[in-house]
Image (cartoon, rainbow, N blue to C red):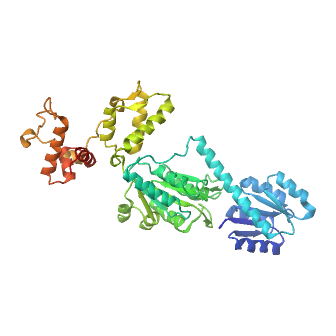
């Protein structure tokens, strides 16, 4: 509850100041108003988390104040304080939407318990709205990361260690697009002590720069033209849980200073607000960019990078995960069979070889789309290579400029294509391919990057073939 705000509305100044001091000892930030009109003015500037109001006030009474507060923001819990002679008014207030009522003379411990319960109720309502929105959008928590390669097992082991901490430091998840950074973030949340609390995902690329600040930090009513009511930001919505900043490298430099303050000080200030609000949120961030390099080039704040990168989890690309490709392919095969009512139960050997040799520039996301398409096209019980519609990606312009066509027959003693880039009929393709790789490595002094350029393939494809042929 630390940092939650309370507005106390009572013309008994001594009592109001005593309540304020007592709540301050419990970590609340409290303000006092002597009448309803002053309370409404404070409502505009502070948007309290809880309101305590006496029924009998000079001018506008507590019941009318309750109606005004509910018009302003129905989510703010109002607790009515009443003397023994005005219990009927308190009951009426509850019927009108008051959270509860408290009898005078006030028991301060009981008052604090009510404040705690009201704030927890607001938080539960926020979580409920979040999960309803997620279910309506068809989002479901994923079971976990699939894979048995040493590289992915190491990442998962680190993720479990991080998840076991209640005071989780910021975690930066790095890796190419489509490697499953968001899935690892959800896995950390699901395995943490905060698994039942919100997991709010922010796609920093999808939100326009002009709206990002208000989305993250919220805004007060009147902060800009369309701000007709106060609204909490995503940091506040994630209270008690995790905020996941996906593609954090795309956050504008002008906003990174405020993001640093939120991460470092655990406070946020709404757009148009005049005070900081304390938050209890764990930060996960992901990027496919080299943020350390961007920080050195002053394209990303160095202090924010170092704050986010307390723990770094790097996800390997799919082409470096070996047989994980087949495990994932089977997983997606089962999923899309169920989705489309198909009966494609196995992957034939040629398709398996193609899945293993393809370099997967789009990683796991690309594999998912390929299997989905293959399931749709398949008519039998086995998924064939033709259904995959895969072709090795062409080298980029730099590789094409640096890489001549495979060595000609005059340059090598191995069987070499005589023309049109194809070996002679009857050639053992694997022996021919192995000879070409050995020749390229020999001519390039064992330099894999240069050998790959000479062969016109990517370095990762070359590494796969070296492993396939047992070459070092």
In the image, residue 312 lies at what x, y percent? 42, 60
The spot of residue 123 in percent (x, y) is 67, 56
| Residue 278 in the image: above or below residue 96 | below
Could you tell me if residue 68 is visible in this image?
A: yes
Left or right: residue 456 versus residue 319 is: left
Residue at the image position 74 percent from the left and 74 percent from the top: 21
Residue found 46% across the figure and 48% down from its top: 145
Which residue is at the front of the view, 119 or 423?
A: 423
Where residue 30 sits, quadrant-wise, is bottom right
Quarter that holds the N terminus: bottom right
* Residue under the image location 53 percent in, 52 percent down: 201
Q: In the current view of this chain or complex, which residue is farthest to the right?
A: 85
Q: Is residue 204 visible?
A: no
Nearer-the-camera pick, 411 or 413: 413
Where does residue 269 sit, x and y in percent of width and height?
59, 64
- Position of 384 with respect to 456 (left or right) is right
Q: Is residue 462 left or right of residue 322?
A: left
Residue extending farthest to the left is 410
The foreground one among 56 and 101 is 101
Above or below: residue 122 compared with residue 440:
below
Residue 27 found in image quarter: bottom right
């Amino acid at each position: 509850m630390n940092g939650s705000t309370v507005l106390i509305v009572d013309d008994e100044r001594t009592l109001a100041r005593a309540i304020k001091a007592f709540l301050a000892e419990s970590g609340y930030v409290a303000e006092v108003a002597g009448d309803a009109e002053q309370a409404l003015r404070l409502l505009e500037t502070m948007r309290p988390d809880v309101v305590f109001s006496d029924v009998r006030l000079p001018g506008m009474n507590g019941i009318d104040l309750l109606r005004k507060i509910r018009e302003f923001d129905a989510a703010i819990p109002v607790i009515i304080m009443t003397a023994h002679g005005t219990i009927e008014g308190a009951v009426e207030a509850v019927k009108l939407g008051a959270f509860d009522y408290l009898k005078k003379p006030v028991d301060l411990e009981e008052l604090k318990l009510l404040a705690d319960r009201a704030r927890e109720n607001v938080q539960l309502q926020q979580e409920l709205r979040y999960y309803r929105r997620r279910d309506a959008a068809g989002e479901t928590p994923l079971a976990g990361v699939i894979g048995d390669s040493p590289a992915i097992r190491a990442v998962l082991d680190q993720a479990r260690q991080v998840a076991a901490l209640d005071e989780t430091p910021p975690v930066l998840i790095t890796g190419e697009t489509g490697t499953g950074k968001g899935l690892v973030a959800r896995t950390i949340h699901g395995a943490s002590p905060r698994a039942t609390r919100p997991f709010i995902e922010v796609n920093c690329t999808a939100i326009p720069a002009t709206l990002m600040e208000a989305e993250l930090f919220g805004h007060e009513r009147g902060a800009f033209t369309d701000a007709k009511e106060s609204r909490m930001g995503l940091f506040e919505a994630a209270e008690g849980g995790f905020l996941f900043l996906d593609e954090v490298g795309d956050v504008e430099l002008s906003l990174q200073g405020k993001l640093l303050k939120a991460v470092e000080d655990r406070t946020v200030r709404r757009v148009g607000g005049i005070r900081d609000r304390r938050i209890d949120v764990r930060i996960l961030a992901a990027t496919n960019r080299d943020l350390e390099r961007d920080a050195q080039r002053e394209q990303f704040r160095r202090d924010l990078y170092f704050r986010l990168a307390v723990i770094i989890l790097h996800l390997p690309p799919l082409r470096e995960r070996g047989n994980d490709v087949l495990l994932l392919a089977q997983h997606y095969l089962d999923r899309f069979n169920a989705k489309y009512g198909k009966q494609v139960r196995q992957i034939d050997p040629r398709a398996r070889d193609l899945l293993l040799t393809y370099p997967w520039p789009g990683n796991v996301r690309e594999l998912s789309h390929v299997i989905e398409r293959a399931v749709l096209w398949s008519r039998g019980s086995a998924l064939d290579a033709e259904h995959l519609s895969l072709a090795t990606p062409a080298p980029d312009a730099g590789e094409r400029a640096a890489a001549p066509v495979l060595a000609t027959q005059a340059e090598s003693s191995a069987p070499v294509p005589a023309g049109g880039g194809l070996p002679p009929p009857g050639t053992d393709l694997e022996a021919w391919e192995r000879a070409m790789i050995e020749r390229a490595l020999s001519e390039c002094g064992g330099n894999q990057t240069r050998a790959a350029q000479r062969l016109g393939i990517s370095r990762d494809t070359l590494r796969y073939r070296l492993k396939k042929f047992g070459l070092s």
